Image (spheres, rainbow, N blue to C red):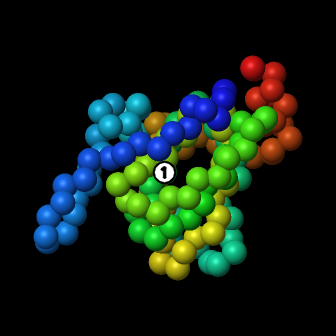
């Protein structure tokens, strides 16, 4: 799997003087049905989250508030993307290693996932991930 498949997705934004609204529909705005939603918050300064890849699960990561960096790696190429707008989501397909860092104070990372939690879907060892990623190319 290539890092070129990772992409920012502009989400619908309805502007209103009372406050803006963004919505997401699985299969409409993102390329998968949503089976799980979770969010990260109160991440202490200097901490890194993620540090894994998935075999089957796809994700859309959104900075619902604040900002953070997403480090991406397909086993050959690396890329860093800063998320800081709640109307953009970062689509991450299968077999992409991800780490989240540089969380701003008060930030919230919202994640939409294509699958329910399944520990067997994770690569948590980078060397094992890289070896497998290079084999399937």
For label 1, the SS is strand
The quadrant where residue 63 appears: bottom left
| Viewer-side residue, 15 vs 46 | 15
Q: Identify the residue at horizontal 60%, vertical 60% (top origin).
A: 69
Residue 1: x, y in percent? Answer: 66, 27
Is residue 7 shown left or right of residue 79? left
| Viewer-side residue, 114 vs 79 | 79
Q: Count the numbered circles shown.
A: 1
Q: What residue is pinned by disc 1?
A: 61
Residue 128 visible at all:
yes
| Viewer-side residue, 39 vs 89 | 89
Q: Identify the residue at horizontal 38%, vertical 36% (top origin).
A: 30
Q: Is residue 25 above or below residue 22?
A: above
Residue 136: x, y in percent? Answer: 75, 20
The quadrant where residue 20 appears: bottom left
Residue 79: x, y in percent? Answer: 67, 47
Is residue 59 shown left or right of residue 128? left
Is residue 89 shown left or right of residue 16? right
């Amino acid at each position: 799997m290539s890092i070129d498949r990772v992409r920012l997705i502009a989400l619908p934004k309805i502007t209103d003087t009372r406050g803006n609204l963004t919505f997401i529909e699985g299969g409409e705005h993102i390329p998968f049905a949503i089976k799980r939603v979770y969010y990260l918050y109160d991440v202490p300064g200097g901490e890194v989250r993620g540090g894994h890849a998935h075999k089957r699960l796809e994700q859309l990561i959104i900075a619902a508030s604040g900002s953070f960096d997403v480090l991406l790696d397909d086993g050959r190429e690396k890329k860093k993307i800063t998320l800081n707008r709640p109307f953009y989501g970062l689509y991450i397909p299968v077999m992409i290693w991800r780490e989240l860092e540089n969380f701003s104070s008060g930030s919230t990372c919202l994640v939409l996932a294509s699958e329910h939690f399944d520990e067997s879907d994770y690569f948590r060892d980078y060397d094992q991930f890289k070896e497998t990623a290079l084999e399937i190319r």
